[in-house]
Amino acid sequence: MTGLTMDMGNAGQLDNECPIQGDFPDYAALAGEPFELMEFEDVAAAHDEFARRSGQVATTVAGAMVSNAAALKSPPGH
């Protein structure tokens, strides 16, 4: 994970694990960024549903990487 710590209020926080912190201690000391995880998840789900209804495919970066890796392993024509 990179970037600022995400402060999710009562749900806790996701710490900043960016390696830049070792070289820039002032960066590591920055306050966490408020982040409403459930609100984000609701918006993401609504977007995915809209995409599905529009005939589009919605995926994550990780999902795209896994799909691409599987496609690269498949022999041509399969």
Image (spheres, rainbow, N blue to C red):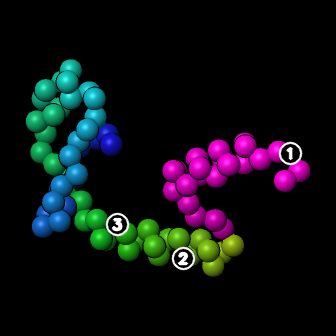
Q: CA distance from mark 2 to mark 3?
A: 14 Å
Q: Quadrant of residue 73?
A: top right
Q: Nearer the viewer, residue 11 or 26?
A: 11
Amino acid at circle 2: Glu
Q: Residue at x 77, y 47 (%)?
A: 74
Of the two numbered discs 1 and 2 on the same chain, state the one appearing first in sequence.
2
Quarter holding the N terminus? top left
Q: CA distance from mark 1 to mark 2?
A: 32 Å
Q: Which residue is mark 2?
A: 49
The answer to whether the residues at label 2 and label 3 have Cβ atoms under 8 Å apart is no
- Left or right: 29 as drawn, with respect to 38: left
Of the two numbered discs 3 and 1 on the same chain, state the one appearing first in sequence.
3
Q: Quadrant of residue 25?
A: top left
Q: Tag 1, which secondary structure?
A: loop
Q: Residue at x 40, y 71 (%)?
A: 43
Magenta stretch, residue numbers: 56-78
Tell me the crowding category of disc 2: few under 14, some 14 to 19, or many 20 or more residues within 10 angstroms, Cα based: some
Q: Tag 2, which secondary structure?
A: helix
Q: Quick check: 1 above or below 36?
A: above
Please state the horizontal and vertical placement of residue 72, each as a whole percent of the image: 72, 42
Q: Residue at x 28, y 41 (%)?
A: 3
Tell me the crowding category of disc 3: few under 14, some 14 to 19, or many 20 or more residues within 10 angstroms, Cα based: few
Q: Nearer the viewer, residue 50 or 78?
A: 78
Please state the horizontal and vertical placement of residue 78, each as a whole percent of the image: 84, 53
Q: Which residue is mark 1?
A: 76
- Left or right: 49 as drawn, with respect to 41: right
Q: Nearer the viewer, residue 55 or 12?
A: 12
Q: Tag 3, which secondary structure?
A: helix
Q: Which residue is mark 3?
A: 40
Amino acid at circle 3: Phe
